[in-house]
Image (tube, rainbow, N blue to C red):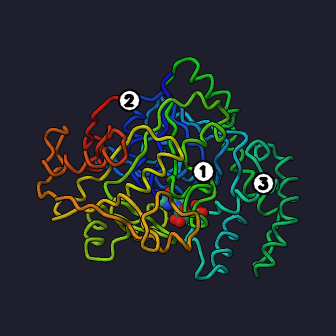
């Protein structure tokens, strides 16, 4: 059995797109199991940049099956735009499969996302405003519309009328204009016609592929610290990016998950609001932001920058079962005199061994740092671990020691070729 989950182990944007693309070249199947177009996975191929939102990173390989599983929320209009952009750039031969049980993001979800954020004021989450939270709320509230209904015109028409009975009340309550079922139906039925050919029972497909020995990659979106259950709630997304959620989000048995590769930057970033214990408030933050191009793929917001939080990484490892690490953007740290790593938290002057569950406590947490010497040598062309500068090697080894997890990939630049593979796991 060859299955591997690629999981963000921080607050998202760790470079999962690059790692998935790296492995996707050998994968038979790439599956996106949760989230939607709130994700933005940047892939660089021959210096050409592609920003994927809902489509799995295996789309560039004609032999790879790309699956959007039941745990996803899919905006059909945006999905088709993404596909058309890829096609216009020459990516015409691909295999795409969409779960009939995934949920559809409709215009009222985006409007409600924006309105909730506005009324929350200072307490806003800082969402991507893609309607993700409202769509997952409808799913949990059993008033969502699934892909299977969406591609059946009669079913879609009835469902949209039923949903709008409630959603229009909600829109009016928030000071917004009610929406017309016919207008949405007439626009969206055309999208449904276009995506119909991709729709199937993806749970059966994934199981069949695993059983026949195919190499299956599960491409996580967001990161463990944005998990609805285990992240810094309420400053989280509305699904679970943890590898532990993959079986439910794909409709497969848990014993089919063999390995989990946690993706971590060599430092930490976060977009949106919420606690961030290792956030840097000196010029070093801008140094890292500029070198790492730390601006959101989806919203273009500047990302907040902090030191590597090995304490949070260990938490992510524990709650989701990470057994290998990929360390991304190591080259960005080149030039710093000293680099800090957070190896523990203290709360009100006392060291703690847990990640607090409330924002009130998380805001009072102080990181406990160790300081490592930096390096000045350019490492963007380094091909082996042995050729890294001594202090870069010491830094990587320290992370392995603190997390008790083997680093199997080191990334030293955005291109496929700028990847050091220390151990083959897939
Ligand atoms: P939502 O997923 O749009 O509801 O946003 C909720 C939180 O998750 C916000 O803080 C977003 O910035 C964050 N978020 C959602 N998707 C991503 C992502 O792909 N990378 C990083 N942060 C994300």
| Image quadrant where one finds the C terminus | top left
Q: Is residue 145 left or right of residue 372?
A: right
The residue carrying mark 1 has its beta carbon less than 8 Å from ligand 1: no
Question: Residue 160's quadrant in the figure?
Answer: bottom right
Q: Is residue 256 left or right of residue 195?
A: left
Going from N to C along the chain, the mark reached first, 2 or 3, is: 3
> Which of these two is toward me, 285 or 74?
285
Work out whether 3 lies above or below 81: above
Question: Residue 286's quadrant in the figure?
Answer: bottom left
The residue carrying pointer 1 sits among few (fewer than 14), some (14 to 19) or many (20 or more) residues within 10 Å by Cα, namely many
Going from N to C along the chain, the mark reached first, 1 or 2, is: 1
Disc 1/disc 2 C-alpha distance (Å): 24 Å
Q: Position of residue 270 (x, y in %)?
A: 44, 65
Cβ atoms under marks 2 and 3 closer than 8 Å: no
The label number, if any, that marks residue 144 in the structure image: 3
Work out whether 384 lies above or below 160: above
Residue at left offset 63%, top offset 36%: 247
Q: Position of residue 243 (x, y in %)?
A: 54, 42
Q: Which residue is mark 2?
A: 425
The kind of secondary structure element at disc 1 is loop
Cβ atoms under marks 1 and 3 closer than 8 Å: no
Question: Residue 305's quadrant in the figure?
Answer: bottom left
Work out whether 150 lies above or below 183: above
Q: Position of residue 173 (x, y in %)?
A: 80, 78
Q: Position of residue 126 (x, y in %)?
A: 55, 71
Q: Which residue is mark 1?
A: 240
Residue at left offset 16%, top offset 62%: 335
The kind of secondary structure element at disc 2 is loop
Residue with the most extreme top position: 212
């Amino acid at each position: 059995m060859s299955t591997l989950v690629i999981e963000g182990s921080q607050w998202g944007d760790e470079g999962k797109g690059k790692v998935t693309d790296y492995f996707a070249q050998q994968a038979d199947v790439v599956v996106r199991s949760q989230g939607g177009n709130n994700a933005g996975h940047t892939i660089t191929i021959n210096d050409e940049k592609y920003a994927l939102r809902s489509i799995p990173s295996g789309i560039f390989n004609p032999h790879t099956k790309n699956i959007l599983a039941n745990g996803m929320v899919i905006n059909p209009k945006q999905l088709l735009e993404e596909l058309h952009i890829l096609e216009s750039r020459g990516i015409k031969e691909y295999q795409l499969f969409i779960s009939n049980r995934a949920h559809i993001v409709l215009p009222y979800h985006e409007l409600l996302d924006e309105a909730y954020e506005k009324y929350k004021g200072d307490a806003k989450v800082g969402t991507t405003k893609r309607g993700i939270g409202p769509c997952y709320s409808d799913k949990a509230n059993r008033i969502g519309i699934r892909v299977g209904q969406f591609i059946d015109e009669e079913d879609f028409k009835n469902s949209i009328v039923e949903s709008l009975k409630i959603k229009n009340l909600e829109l009016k309550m928030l000071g917004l204009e009610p929406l017309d079922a016919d207008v949405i139906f007439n626009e969206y039925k055309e999208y449904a016609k276009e995506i119909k050919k991709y729709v199937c029972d993806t749970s059966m497909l994934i199981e069949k592929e695993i059983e026949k020995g195919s190499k299956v990659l599960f491409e996580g979106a967001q990161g463990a610290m944005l998990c609805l259950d285990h992240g810094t709630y309420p400053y989280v997304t509305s699904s679970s990016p943890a590898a532990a959620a993959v079986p439910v989000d794909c409709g497969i048995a848990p014993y089919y998950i063999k390995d989990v590769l946690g993706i971590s930057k060599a430092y930490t970033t976060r977009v949106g609001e919420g606690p961030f214990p290792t956030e840097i408030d000196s010029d070093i933050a801008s140094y890292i932001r500029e070198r790492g191009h730390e601006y959101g793929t989806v919203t273009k917001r500047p990302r907040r920058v902090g030191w590597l939080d090995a304490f949070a990484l260990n938490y992510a490892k524990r709650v989701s079962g990470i057994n290998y690490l990929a360390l991304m953007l190591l080259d960005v740290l080149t030039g710093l005199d000293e680099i800090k790593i957070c190896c523990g938290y203290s709360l009100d002057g006392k060291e703690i061994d847990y990640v607090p569950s409330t924002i009130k406590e998380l805001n009072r947490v102080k990181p406990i740092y160790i300081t490592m010497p930096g390096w000045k040598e350019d490492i963007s062309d380094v091909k082996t671990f042995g050729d890294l500068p001594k202090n870069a090697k010491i830094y990587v080894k320290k992370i392995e020691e603190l997390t008790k997890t083997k680093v199997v990939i080191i990334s030293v630049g955005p291109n496929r070729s700028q990847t050091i593979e220390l151990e083959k796991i897939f």
